Image (cartoon, helix red, strand yellow):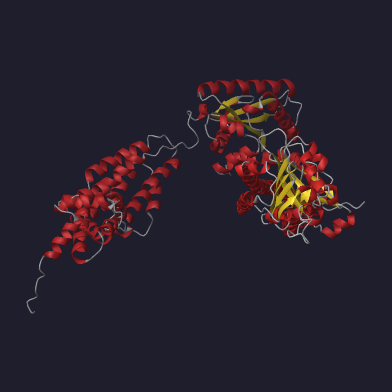
Amino acid sequence: MKSLSFLSKLTMFAFAISILPVLFIGSFSYFTSSKEIQKNVNESKMELILQITSNVEHKLTTVNQTLNQVVNSSVLKKALNNPLNVTDFILYNDIRNEIRNMQSFDTKLEDVILLNQRQNWMIKNSGLYRLNEYQNYEQLTNLMNIPDKTSWVLNPSSLFYSEESINVTGCNYSISLIKKLPTTKLQKYGLAMANIPACSLQDFINSDVQPLDSIIVLDENGRILLHPDRSLIGQPAEAGGFTGFQRIAAAAEPSGQFKTEIDKEDYSITYMRSQLNGWIYLSVTSIESLTRESGKIGTYTVFVCTFMLLLSVLLAWLGSRRMYTPIERLLNQMGQRRPGLRARHTDEFQLIGEQVHSLFQSKSQLEKEVSQHIGQVRTFFLIQAFQGNLRKRELLEELEQYGYRKQVEEWKTMAVITLSIDFSEESSYEKKDLNLLLFAAHNMIEELVSADNRLTPVMMGHALATVIGSSDGNTESFHRTLYALTEKLQQEINNYLKLQVSIGLSLPFHSFDKMSIAYRESLEALKHRITLGKGIIIQYENINSGKHYLNLNYPTHTENDLMDAIKLADSDKAKELLHKLFKCIFALGLSPQEYQIPLTRLLNNTLIMMQESGITLNQIYHANGSLFEELTDLHIVAEIEDWFWTIVIQPVIVIFHSRQNAQYHNISEKLIDIVQHEYDQDLTLEECASRLHYNANYISSVFRKETQYYFSDYLTMYRFKMAKKWLEETDMPVKDIASRLRYNNSQNFIRSFRKQEGMTPGQYRDNFSSKPKAVPDDY
């Protein structure tokens, strides 16, 4: 099977994690909303039934109350004991008035019927009848057999309108409230019936019902009392296709909901059993109508989910492409293309893994080759270090690079030892074996001296050199350890190789950048084998009084004092300091060639001071030669000191002395000029002194002598002068004036101004603006 590329897998994964949440959320929202709609509809159906039940029972209760008034009236009680003949017109009329008063209420009553089985009469809207002569006499008298004294019974309307040609109600059934008479006696021989046409109640119910709802009312026996299809009134519930009556009758709860099938369609039934008369109120709603809103939500959900799916797929595709870009770029750098990967059935990461594995193999091979040459490179580096060809920073960096980081951090005292092999006639070796013998000595040094206490030995010409170090800062202790180490090394080489070796020791040093000096010291020590013999250990301090190679301590402080005395034209002090300087220089005990260095330095610094002070060389030296050449030709200390005084220093002092008075005035003028042009900058006396090439203390004393002000006071005074000018002539804000005069904030400037002038800058400006302007003479 062809393997998928990583891009395909990534895209498929992105599709999955983007599509699944959308599908889940869409399905969840649809089913949740459908469930909530079903719940809300069921609750609304129950509320509707409660409302209809309440309204219907209110009507029935009203009928019951008005009928009670009739049956309990004295007129009816009197009539029950009277045969009601034609002569009893007044009594009949009273009864009819009672009935009319009952029908006057808004109770939907069609007729109120009174019958007396004992006196054989019946009264209704159409008149007075002999009961045994009425067409439906038997059906009416059978109503006496109902078990309850008061009952609501569904009767055919034809029972009450047999003598009329038509049914005036237009309804086939009437709901009759039947009360047995007399109410106060145990033996019942009469009936009072209040007839309500079932159709009128159905219309009353329909006014409260939504178009999609269907309300059915059943009696306690399961017969249909009210139904939208009037033809079903009076028939059992099964005739209308409803088969759930037994479930309702068996239910312990007076209300509830369930689903059933009517005429092969699913319906939701909400029912309630009346506590008044045992009627069962049903709300029948088609499941299809209930789910119609859910269908709309489902449609909207499908549209939204489809849009979200398309958007998610697009974003997933774009995101996958973007995430794949670095991998594709990496593959392109490897010279691979996706078509080639498809042809080879290779996954991108498999290919990258192969390339990385190849790189690691190459790296391992390269490291192996480098490790074979690292020793040679390190040896070359140490040779460069001993020869002094590396700067300090480079030296320390490369020491750490070659694995000497611990030595760089911990060593406090070091020395260079140089080992040279002494050949003799008794030795079995020849000079041609020198390199082999040095290599053997090299290995023995590495074995006898711990790597933490040495650098790698290197062959320098005909000798072997290495650096020995210690974390002990005590020079004497290090010296003893170093001497014992070299004795042991010399003895071991003699025991194993049967050779005599000489070892030269440098002076201890404390910084790696002194390696080249120490190496030359060790070589210098080895040179004394000519007079001391073979197989010896020679310490450089024993042949050079413990001094480093070219150890020079130049008296810089004395030289600075000399330069100041020359500038002040103080001849006596300058001559004294010159003598002191020479005494310090020639107390170092250097060689004649080495003395040229401090003397040349003194002459060079003097010439630099002259140039900075504006004195040219032609003003003090008129010969055609060079001062440095003349200095080199001098060999006696007294001559050199006298030459410096008469040729260089004294002529300079004369020039400074001749310029001294004018110079004071010149310095003050220059300082004043600087203040007047740069008062709005951060001026300091030290900066001005540097620009004028004078000592700050010197120009401070000169300025105060000439102006009677300190430099800082004069600067402040001039700045206040400019501030008052701006306050008088411009509208510049005080804040800007303070900023231009280099105050950190305007409050400091205001306080200083008030201290100086006795008022704030704003008050000063107001006072000046209130004064009358001077009028020109020619006005």
Q: Residue furthest left?
A: 777
Decide which of 323, 578 is in the foreground and name it.
Answer: 323
Q: Is residue 476 above or below residue 101?
A: above
Q: Is residue 21 visible?
A: no
Q: Is residue 238 above or below residue 482?
A: below
Q: Is residue 527 above or below residue 706?
A: above
Residue placed most toward the observer, 149 or 129: 129
**Relative to 466, is 763 on the left or the right?**
left
Q: Position of residue 406 (x, y in %)?
A: 61, 31
Q: Residue furthest right?
A: 1
Q: Is residue 290 left or right of residue 636?
A: right
Quarter of the image holding residue 593? Answer: top left
Residue 72 placement (x, y as % from top left): 62, 41
The spot of residue 202 in percent (x, y) is: 72, 54
Quadrant of the drawing holding the C terminus: bottom left
Q: Nearer the viewer, residue 775 or 526?
A: 775
In front of the other: 700 or 509: 700
Q: Can residue 452 be seen by looking at this rendering?
A: yes
Residue reaching furthest front?
87
- Which corner quadrant of the image does residue 75 belong to? top right
239 horizontally vs 303: left or right: right
Q: How many numbered dots are placed on residues in this image?
A: 0
Residue 580 in picture, x, y percent from top left: 30, 38
